[in-house]
Amino acid sequence: MSTLKIQPTAFALSSSVRQLGFFNLKLPRNCVASSNHFSRYGTRRALTVSMSTTSSTPLEVCVKSSTTAPNKPGDCPFCQRVLLTLEEKHLPYDLKLVDLAHKPDWFLKLNPGGKVPVIKLNEKWISDSDVIAQALEEKYPDPPLGTPPEKASVGSKIFSTFIGFLKSKDPSDGTEKALISELSSFNNHIKDNGPYVNGKEVSAVDLSLAPKLYHLEIALGHYKKWSVPDSLPHVKSYMKAIFSRDSFIKTRAQPEDVIAGWRPKVLG
Ligand SMILES: N[C@@H](CCC(=O)N[C@@H](CS)C(=O)NCC(=O)O)C(=O)O
């Protein structure tokens, strides 16, 4: 495992790691993805970034690990939401990758519920991306990422209608129509308010929605040869803008993981 010790500001840390093209990975012997996972690729490669000042102590965060690439996060949109929040707030973090197919004891001990993401805040492990995003906003209000209440549920039905359409085996059952209807409302919202849900700056609702739209794009493209229609240009430009942010590129899942992750739902 290679180790890099630097003591930058949180922002400089974020930039350094980004330039190096790595995640801030600190993988204690009992905190790695499965040995099968690593043995497929022969070697372990990880980057540990240590910081000494109290205010920039990395936050420990557990997320799903990739099943197709070493040392990468997996296809969990809730985990990516938390990582995006940490990135956009320039908070350093220790990423602990959890093999959900073989949950390790150390993970079940800290989180008996067994779900990711979980993060350690104020010496306590907390779960659920909604709760985590809110707690991070309260503890680290700068830069602010809060979405005004009247916009907090924009796009909130896109994910469930996407899943309905993905699982559907009957082309005339209305599931595609339901998804297009939700995407159309979103298109209108972005047209009037964009480029992001709350205007010029990205906010919490974007960080929740973007990973779900990423899954939508990859899974529907793969399983249904479907893409967002050209009649919804603001949805397309929104996806392009948010998918190209450094924070998104750094935290996104491998397309192969997304495809594999949805396969049971499609076949089921
Ligand atoms: N509502 C939760 C959902 C988290 C969730 O469903 N995580 C999945 C991975 S995407 C998980 O941990 N599954 C493992 C399990 O249920 O055993 C959140 O927003 O954090």
Image: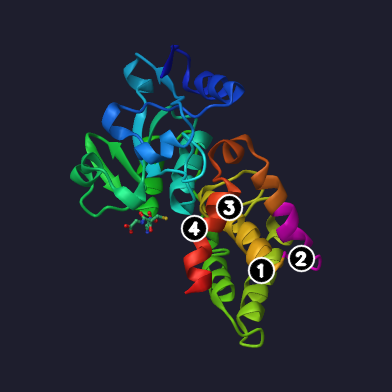
Mark 1 → mark 4, Cα distance in angstroms:
23 Å
Q: What residue is drawn where x is 53% and y is 71%?
A: 266
Q: What residue is drawn where x is 53% and y is 27%?
A: 22
Nearer the observer, disc 1 or disc 4?
4
Q: What residue is drawn where x is 42% and y is 19%?
A: 49
As helix, strand or loop, the secondary structure at mark 3 comes to: helix
Examine the structure image and report whether residue 237 is included in the region drawn in magenta.
yes
Q: How many marks?
A: 4
Mark 3 → mark 4, Cα distance in angstroms:
17 Å
The amino acid sitting under disc 1 is Leu
Would the CB of label 2 be found within 8 Å of ligand 1? no
Pointer 4 with pointer 2, Cβ within 8 A? no
Nearest to N terminus: mark 2 or mark 1: 1
Q: Is residue 33 among the parts visible in the rendering?
A: no
Q: Which residue is mark 1?
A: 183
Nearest to N terminus: mark 3 or mark 4: 3
Q: Position of residue 252 (x, y in %)?
A: 56, 43
Pointer 2 with pointer 3, Cβ within 8 A? no
Examine the structure image and report whether residue 29 is included in the region drawn in magenta.
no
Nearer the observer, disc 3 or disc 4?
4
The amino acid sitting under disc 3 is Ala
Region in magenta: 227-238
Nearest to N terminus: mark 4 or mark 2: 2
The residue sitting at the bottom extreme is 172
Q: Is residue 175 among the parts visible in the rendering?
A: yes
Q: Which residue is mark 4?
A: 261
Mark 2 → mark 1, Cα distance in angstroms:
8 Å
Mark 2 → mark 3, Cα distance in angstroms:
16 Å
